[in-house]
Image (tube, helix red, strand yellow):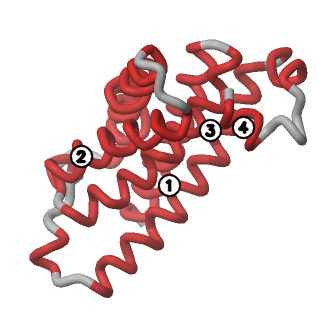
Amino acid sequence: MQLYHLILSRRWPLSLIESRPYRSALLLGAGTGLLSASLGATVACLLQALLPRQILGPSAAAALANLAPWSLLVMGGFLIPLWETCAAQWLPLEMGRLAGFNDIACVALAAMVFGAGHYLNGGLAHGVCAAIAGALFATAYLVMRPCGYLPAFWASFVAHAVNNLLLLLILLI
């Protein structure tokens, strides 16, 4: 609830968001996804420019390179974000809330889980970019959490899907 009050309460009262929680979650998720893709691309470029290639590691998405473009978009834009939202946002955030963590600690936990998973599959650059994205996705989740599990999950999933689709479209073009 802290993040909701910090981010949305001045512009949109909870009663307005609760009247259309999925629409609000969709808009929040889309905006978060745009921010995440922009920030992720910027950080990736900075890391590429500043660090040696050996430290950065391979691409975590290299295994998806053999897929047809439409399959890649379905996997990267729907199925993978669905799984990762469950494993790296919903589960750690709800476990953190049950353990009594505040919102900032929950965001940090989810960002570390998300970043660690991508680091193990793709190296330092992918892990750092994913940790930043994971923090943004977790923030979207917690902002919508006062409206329930599903709107919160929807906001995080949409943010993740928009992020992935934008980055995949850039790579495919």
- Secondary structure under tag 1 reads helix
Q: Which residue corresponds to the image point at 58% horizontal and 14% vertical from the top-left? A: 150
Q: Quadrant of the C terminus?
A: bottom left
Q: Which residue corresponds to the image point at 27% horizontal and 59% vertical from the top-left? A: 126
Labels 1 and 4: the sequence-earlier one: 4
Q: Residue 168 in the image: x percent, y percent?
A: 40, 55
- Tell me, for residue 27, which label it has, or none: 4
Q: Dots 1 and 2: beta carbons under 8 Å?
A: no
Q: Which residue corresponds to the image point at 23% horizontal and 82% vertical from the top-left? A: 51
Labels 4 and 2: the sequence-earlier one: 4
- Secondary structure under tag 4 reads helix
Cα gap from disc 3 to disc 2, whole angstroms: 22 Å
What residue sits right under mark 1 in the picture? 166
Say which amino acid is labelled 3: Gly
- Secondary structure under tag 3 reads helix
Cα gap from disc 3 to disc 1, whole angstroms: 13 Å
Q: Dots 3 and 1: beta carbons under 8 Å?
A: no
Q: Residue 170 in the image: x percent, y percent?
A: 44, 64
Q: Quadrant of the N terminus?
A: top right
Of labels 3 and 2, the one closer to you: 2
